[in-house]
Image (cartoon, grey):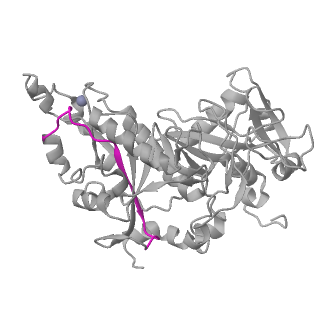
């Protein structure tokens, strides 16, 4: 492997491949513990463990100082996104028709799958009735110039290239691997488009595949979960932005699904006898010329008491009895991650924090969150007093002694709707399982080596 920017960016994945490919450990799965808007209460599933750290074999100064990196579920995709190729239409045009290329098919954001633990990836032959072969033959400039809102194409998104897949790989310049796209088969667009989508869906369902209808899909192996997360987040954003947020006219997908633009002309207007030019729109004249996919940052924090011997956890009304998790909430505009942690913990539990340290993060494609996990501490016991009076979001918040939390990590983890393990003692603390970033934060917060930086016999 050469020392190109590509490899510098992608090296961790190569190191990890032997460890995380075919990673099919079965264990209880779970989620983050949002205490606010996203509703996770319906989640009851089993599935794979979180991905391995990408640099598991690598030695570095930072790894020696901070230890093993935590990699959360939905992150660590096997795909190299090659984002700079999204505007290279000859690449895209060749990639969609390449026999090795794989299409993840979504219908109303539900992915087509062979089973709840295996996605179905289609080939071009299976979708060619809806993906015209010349869909990427023109440059974006030409597409904009010829824009006609009467003509529709299904949403297509270039996700990246799996460089580990050598079989049927496509080579482009110095890059080689199997390209991945996401394709929308929802009932959208022209009647013809909808008819094609319907017949593709019928043909694939006749083969025994199904669109996974779960509200939250957490049953996939880690690699597929990361690919699905990217596809779902981008598809959802495209579907919500078919009209310009500034002038209200239709938008056009660009950058292979990673950008939307407001075209200056529309041939459909000319057909109605109107000027082909649309009314002026600020998105075409200022730096806000572009509309890119959004990611909403959310904080989630494990909070330690001043003496480091207790941890603050809270519960919402929809949690089962004895079930607690870390506090969470959205980062607001013009707020740092650290400020957001301090504000949320104070608003929800009345506790005043001092130092906040960012630990790890978890993409959460429901619809577009990035959960930023932190560990924080109170500096003065006087600031530990819990009050639920500010924000009525939590039903309860409590300080738990670390041995009780350790016991819960050992015996009391499960998905929300699932029972805890056989060693669980009725009435004791229950918490989310390892696939939830909440669990990872709790583990890190009570790991004295992680928190103090000093080696102890405990680990
Ligand atoms: Zn506009």
Range shown magenta: 146-166
Looking at the image, in which quadrant does ligand 1 appear?
top left
User: Is 161 included in the stretch rendered in magenta?
Assistant: yes
- List the single residue furthest toward the front: 206
Most foreground residue, 434 or 100: 100
Quarter holding the C terminus is bottom right
Residue 79, position as x, y percentages in the image: 45, 61
User: Is 425 included in the stretch rendered in magenta?
Assistant: no
- List the single residue furthest toward the bottom: 1
Q: Is residue 247 left or right of residue 349?
A: left
Residue 262, position as x, y percentages in the image: 23, 34
Residue at image position (66%, 27%) is 347
Residue 446 visible somewhere in the drawing: yes
Number of numbered labels in the structure image:
0
Residue 353 placement: quadrant? top right
Q: Does 444 sit above or below residue 356?
A: below
Q: Does 59 sit above or below residue 111?
A: below
Residue at image position (39%, 79%) is 2
Residue 308, position as x, y percentages in the image: 80, 48
Residue at image position (20%, 32%) is 150
Q: Magenta region, mostly helix, strand or loop?
A: loop
Quarter holding the N terminus is bottom left
Residue 75 visible somewhere in the drawing: no
Most foreground residue, 28 or 359: 28
Residue 37 placement: quadrant? top right
């Amino acid at each position: 492997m050469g020392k190109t920017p590509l490899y510098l960016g992608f090296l961790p994945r190569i190191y990890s491949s032997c460890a995380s490919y075919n990673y099919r450990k079965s264990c209880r799965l779970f989620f983050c513990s949002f205490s606010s808007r996203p509703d996770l209460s319906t989640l009851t599933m089993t599935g794979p463990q979180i991905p391995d750290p990408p640099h598991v074999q690598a030695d570095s100064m930072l790894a020696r100082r901070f230890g093993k990196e935590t990699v959360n579920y939905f992150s660590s995709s096997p795909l190299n996104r090659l984002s700079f190729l999204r505007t290279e239409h000859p690449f895209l045009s060749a990639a969609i028709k390449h026999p090795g290329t794989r299409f993840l098919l979504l219908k109303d954001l539900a992915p087509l799958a062979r089973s709840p633990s295996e996605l179905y990836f289609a080939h071009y032959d299976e979708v060619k009735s809806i993906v015209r072969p010349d869909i990427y033959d023109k440059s974006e400039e030409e597409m904009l110039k010829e824009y006609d809102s009467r003509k529709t194409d299904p949403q297509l998104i270039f996700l990246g290239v799996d460089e580990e897949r050598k079989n049927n790989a496509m080579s482009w310049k110095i890059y080689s691997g199997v390209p991945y796209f996401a394709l929308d088969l929802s009932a959208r667009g022209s009647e013809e488009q909808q008819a094609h989508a319907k017949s593709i869906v019928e043909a694939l369902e006749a083969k025994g595949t199904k669109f996974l209808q779960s509200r939250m899909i957490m049953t996939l192996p880690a690699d597929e979960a990361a690919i699905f997360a990217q596809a779902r987040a981008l598809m959802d954003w495209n579907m919500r932005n078919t009209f310009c947020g500034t002038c209200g006219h239709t938008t056009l997908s660009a950058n292979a699904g990673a950008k939307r633009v407001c075209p200056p002309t529309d041939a459909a207007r000319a057909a109605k006898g109107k000027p082909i030019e649309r009314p002026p729109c600020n998105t075409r004249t200022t730096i806000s010329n572009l509309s890119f996919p959004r990611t909403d940052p959310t904080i989630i924090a494990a909070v330690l008491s001043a003496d480091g011997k207790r941890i603050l956890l809270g519960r919402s009304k929809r949690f089962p009895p004895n079930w607690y998790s870390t506090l969470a909430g959205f980062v607001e505009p013009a707020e740092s991650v650290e400020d957001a942690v301090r504000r949320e913990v104070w608003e929800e539990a009345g506790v005043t924090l001092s130092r906040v340290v960012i630990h790890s993060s978890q993409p959460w494609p429901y619809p577009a969150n990035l959960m930023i996990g932190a560990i924080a501490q109170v500096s003065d016991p006087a600031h530990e007093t819990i009050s639920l009076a500010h924000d009525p979001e939590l039903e309860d918040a409590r300080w738990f002694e670390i041995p009780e939390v350790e016991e819960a990590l050992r015996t009391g983890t499960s998905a929300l709707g699932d029972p805890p393990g056989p060693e669980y003692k009725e009435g004791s603390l229950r918490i989310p399982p390892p696939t939830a970033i909440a669990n990872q934060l709790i583990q890190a917060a009570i790991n004295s080596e992680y928190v103090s930086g000093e080696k102890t016999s405990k680990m």
